[in-house]
Image (spheres, helix red, strand yellow):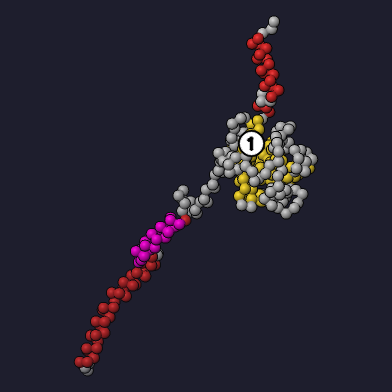
Amino acid sequence: MAVPPRGAWRLLLLLLLAGSAASPADEGGERREAGGSEHGGGDEAARPHHDSSYGTFANEFYDLRYLSEEGYPFPTAPPVDPFAKIRVDDCGKTKGCFRYGKPGCNAETCDYFLSYRRIGADVEFELSADTDGWVAVGFSSDKKMGGDDVMACVHDDNGRVRIQHFYNVGQWAKEIQRNPARDEEGVFENNRVTCRFKRPVYVPREETIVDLHLSWYYLFAWGPAIQGSITRHDIDSPPVSERVVSIYKYEDIFMPSAAYQTFSSPFCLLLIVALTFYLLMGTP
């Protein structure tokens, strides 16, 4: 048998050494493949650190950006600003006011309250009345109901207070779809309807909407509502401003309700004095 030359032996030895060095990695790879097929998810198990790091990042990102304080998966809507209370300290100074009811009453205790003030090209109105239905103000060329531009705040069955526009046709109020009100807000609390809105000083000439830069008599009314629709006002003769009102003049005007008008009239005061004198002096 022929003996291989020395160079061939040397080549064979190098090949054996190279094979022995590569076999552990190959066998490890085969073992990893076998382990993946036996246990499932071998690739995921081979990268535990990567998965853990990614999961931590994802959880923190989700928690910070997509969970509300209550733990909901989406951020909650911002809270609605509460209705700002009507300030009566400004009456007669920075806004005009009308109060109807008990002497010394304010926007939360008067039977009816109205304020107005100019803000740029608008007039802001605040209305409040002791009712669960509606409260309104009418702009009239006289002191009588009929042919009047009316703004009303109506409490509906869903608890909302909506600003509506009406036009008085005789003793009947007809709703007008064209509503000049803006920045509307209203609330029903403590059995009172209270609202705030703006309307422009100047408007295109139209029968149902008056220009507020002119002076008008103000008609004050309030009453019940049925399914969000206004009904007849609470009292037979609602109060009216004694004279025309100018939005350029701020006054604080009080009007006593019927319960307090009886003893404030000059005739009644004279009668009380006469009766008191008669009782003190006695009869001859």
Who's the residue at 39% across and 61% down the image? 57
**Which residue does the numbered mark 1 point to in the structure image?**
253
Quick one: SS at disc 1? strand
State the image quarter where residue 87 is shown: top right
Quarter of the figure with the N terminus: bottom left
In this view, the residue in front, 233 or 231, is: 233
Q: Position of residue 151 (x, y in %)?
A: 69, 44
Who's the residue at 62% across and 39% down the image? 251
Horizontal placement of 225 versus 72: left or right? right
Q: Position of residue 139 (x, y in %)?
A: 71, 43
Which residues, given as a range, are shown in magenta?
46-65
Q: Position of residue 38 (x, y in %)?
A: 38, 65
State the image quarter where residue 254 is shown: top right
Amino acid tagged 1: Ile
Q: Compared to 42, does 243 lie above or below?
A: above
Is 64 magenta? The answer is yes
